[in-house]
Amino acid sequence: PAPHLQSYKNRAAKHSNPAARALLRCMEAKKSNLAVSVDVTTTKDFFDIIEAVAPYVCLIKTHVDILEDWNPGVTTRLQHLSREHNFLIFEDRKFADIGNTVALQYSSGLYKISSWAHIVNAHPVPGPSIITGLASVGMKLQEERGLLLLAEMSTKGALTIGSYTVEAVRMAREHRDFVIGFIAQHRMESIGLSGTDDVVDEDFLILAPGVGLDSKGDAMGQQYRTPTEVVTQCGCDVIIVGRGIIGIGRDIDAEKVKEQARRYQTAGWEAYEKRIVT
Ligand code: 5FU
């Protein structure tokens, strides 16, 4: 059966990439396909949110470059929490440059992303060399590392459509050791295959941003769908939720954040249980 009809557990047992296996195992163990996007600008809010949502998530998604008081201790503490609470870390860096540059951006600079993020993502726009550039860093490490390609964005008018998405999937198929899946809005198995092609034995994880239960979008082009639309109907594997859980006000209310995380975890898991057959 196609990957989205199989349980996360079965897929974990078969996957060839260690980061994908770790994520699928964690999802099964915590009964969670929820990733929380911690888009705040102070490390206090950052850790208050992570500590509140940790029991309910399989993945924490970061934009470390928006933290005003970032210091190397932040990523040390984040890694510690990841081990303590069993979640993976995804730095939503959206690399988009030539191979040599992205390799440096991934390994070096202030953030040394490759030393702490299990998962990163990249725009396919430069072509396959962006994958080989990032793989030259990630695949050399002992730790589990994987890459997602941005095949479809969630925003209104996004250019990630048609042949761009098809080519993104082709690029990923050529690098299945390191590319574990896509940021996308639906499954990608049938993309780029004609009716006569064999169905490829591949299992790409689909992580979908643009998920909200109470709102349809924001004033800056974001578009939201519900966990049912995203997971049951479109076959995505992980729901990525930011403001739906962390709120949009200035002050973080840890109790409210916890309650929303629990709500999205339940909604995401029920949507998954409705779609699997094995
Ligand atoms: F690649 C993408 C995309 O297509 N849409 C997104 O929204 C990434 N995102 C990220 O997911 C974005 O940078 C935010 O960090 C997060 C969504 O946050 P929200 O508060 O749930 O809208």
Image (tube, rainbow, N blue to C red):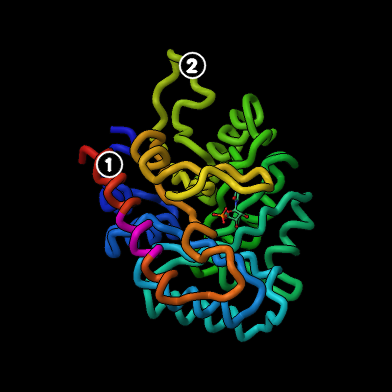
Q: What residue type is labelled 1?
A: Gln
Instruction: Specify few, some or many for label 1: CA neighbours under 10 Å numbering under 14, 14-19, or 20 or more.
Output: some
Q: Earlier in the sequence, mark 2 or mark 1?
A: 1
Which residues fall within the magenta stretch? 260-266
Residue found 53% across the figure and 62% down from its top: 37
Residue at which label 2 appears: 194
Residue 226 part of the magenta segment: no
Numbered mark located on residue 6 in the image: 1
Residue 129, given in percent of the width and then of the height, sits at 71, 45
Helix, strand or loop at mark 2? loop
Image point (56%, 34%), residue name = 169
Q: Disc 2 residue type?
A: Ser
Quick one: quadrant of the N terminus?
top left
Q: Is label 1 in a helix, a strand or a loop? A: loop
Name the residue at 42% across, 51% down. Answer: 238
Which x, y percent locates residue 179?
54, 48
